[in-house]
Image (cartoon, grey):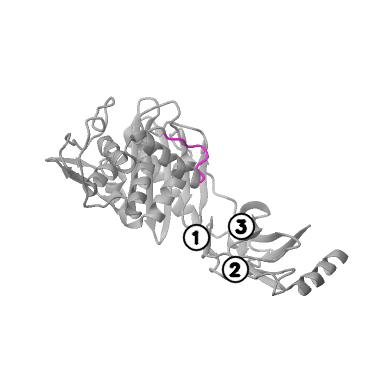
Amino acid sequence: MNRTLALLLALCCLSTPTHALPNDPQLAAQNYVLYDSTSQQMLVEHNANARIAPASLTKLMTAYVVLGAIEQGKLSLSKNLSPTAYALRLQNEETRMFLEVGKPVKVDELLNGLMVQSANDAARVLAEAVANHEIAFADLMNAQAKRLGLINTHFANATGVEEALHYSSARDLALLSAALIHDFPEAYRRYAQREFKYNGINQLNRNRLLWLDPFVDGLQTAHTDGTGFSLVSSALRDKRRLIAVVLGTDKENLRSTESQRLLNHGYKEFELSLLYRADQAVSTLRLWKGTEHQVQVGFREDRYITLPIGARAQLRAKLETKQPLLAPALAGQTVGTLHLHLNGTPFLDLPVVVLESVPLANVFSRGVDAIRLFFQ
């Protein structure tokens, strides 16, 4: 059976004004999303799950896999790599850091080429260093995509060169970007570099928002004749990080201006609100056959939500749990869902977990609870 607990997060009186969700901005782009990485909420979505050719946005996953290999000790920033002719082959017109066959280059410089210049040659050299071949590296990319829950993403190469089974979506690219920022915060700072010089050639970062908005610190641009101009950008203002994905604008300057509109919309129309502290009990539930008869449930980390500005008073919540709840109850085990409603409309569902483990009771205590459950 289901047990539903009504939890009032705020009291409101009849004079309290209601706040509807802000109207989404209409951008001159084929696909776009706005994601709040702190609350893990999509604030704006337009054709968010449509599969598109990601082009150079692919290199977000390339960077993610390479940085993971460095963290695992499989590569070091100081290691010299010798580019192969295969890695440096030209595939149509592509961005390069102008590596030379056989000329040693440090992983540190290759990362700058990948993350600042969006260099295809750097991506292929790093892919070979991690997995010996770009095709094997693509398998690693797909394994990470599956782990991150990117359901509309599949990679066939490390650079974004168009292939039939190479695709992603605006929503997946936002989730990937959030994971990259969260898991590799130090390395992420490279995306904020405005320029990088290698082999006597100085190249500028193509993300023009780095010059236009002091709060923007990443991430990646892309362009193909088929899909147009795209930009994944991220900004940090007042400790709030938003990620904007804008795909398929007709002109290069539009990807910047439309991304700026989307970010400004998020900061102007929404605010971040602390719902529960880490390990703060949302509720105490009856537990059967355990050494304790009750168990507290909540969130293991501070749980923030993003709301329209001034809408906190209209928020209501119901905690739904599956009953009976039987021991053992393990810390972190999902035991229910907190359903949030705004102005009486479903707004957000959040999983709640056991805060402290409770083991099985002895045979006698379990037997007593079994009898009590039978008569319930």
Question: Amino acid type of disc 1?
Answer: Leu
Of circles 3 and 1, the one toward us is 3
Most distant residue in the left direction? 200
Of mark 1 and mark 2, the one earlier in the sequence is: 1
**C-alpha distance separating marks 3 and 1:** 19 Å
Quarter of the image containing the C terminus? bottom right
The answer to whether residue 362 is visible is yes
Of circles 2 and 3, the one toward us is 2
The residue positioned 43% from the left and 50% from the top of the image is: 178
Left or right of residue 45: residue 220: left
Residue that carries the numbered disc 2 in the rendered image:
355
Above or below: residue 313 compared with residue 112: below
Q: Element at badge 3?
A: strand
Of mark 3 and mark 1, the one earlier in the sequence is: 1
The residue positioned 43% from the left and 51% from the top of the image is: 179
Label 1 with label 2: CB-CB less than 8 Å = no
The residue positioned 61% from the left and 62% from the top of the image is: 353
Residue that carries the numbered disc 1 in the rendered image:
272
The residue positioned 62% from the left and 52% from the top of the image is: 347
Q: Quadrant of residue 257?
A: top left
Decide whether residue 150 is among the magenta residues: yes
Q: Nearer the viewer, residue 246 or 11?
A: 246
Label 3 with label 1: CB-CB less than 8 Å = no
Residue that carries the numbered disc 3 in the rendered image:
351
**Magenta stretch: helix, strand or loop mostly:** loop
Q: Element at badge 1?
A: strand
Question: Amino acid type of disc 3?
Answer: Pro
The part of the chain drawn in magenta is 149-155
> Residue 68 in the image: x percent, y percent?
37, 50
Q: Nearer the viewer, residue 63 or 137?
A: 137
